[in-house]
Image: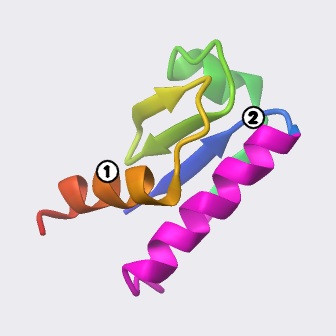
Amino acid sequence: MKVQILGSGCARCEDLYNNAVAALSRLKDSDTKVEKTADPEVFFRLKVNMTPALVIDDEVVSTGKLLTVDEIETELLKRSGE
């Protein structure tokens, strides 16, 4: 699974990153890493115009919202088939 946080490095972007790391930790998923990117080409390709954005396996899950650890965990579980 590929998890990305798209953002400029703002406080909300960092908080979303930390929440994603915590959600993966809760799920005991040490294989998946969370990647931060501020690359405008990635934003354009994924049609993201608000940050922070959570992207899982190249699918935009949320934009402009700080998801909680529980919300991210739910999204990860949906995509893992568990």
Q: Which mark is residue 25?
A: none
Q: Answer above or below: position of 82 versus 58.
A: below
Residue 20 can be seen in this image: yes
| Residue 51 lies within the magenta run | no
Q: Answer above or below: position of 40 versus 14.
A: above
Mark 1 or mark 2: which is in front?
1
Query: What residue would you read off at disc 2?
Result: 7
Indicate the position of residue 47 as horizontal and vertical percent values.
52, 14
Indicate the position of residue 82 as horizontal and vertical percent values.
12, 69
Q: Which residues are magenta?
A: 11-34
Query: What residue would you read off at disc 1?
Result: 75
Considering the whole magenta stretch, tell me its main secondary structure: helix
Local crowd size for mark 1, using a 10 Å CA cut-off: few (<14), some (14–19), many (≥20):
some
| Residue located 55% across and 60% down the image | 20
| Residue 28 lies within the magenta run | yes
Q: Quadrant of residue 6?
A: top right
| Residue located 64% across and 23% down the image | 43
In screen coordinates, is 56 left or right of 39? left
Residue at disc 1, secondary structure: helix
| Residue located 31% across and 50% down the image | 75
Residue at disc 2, secondary structure: loop
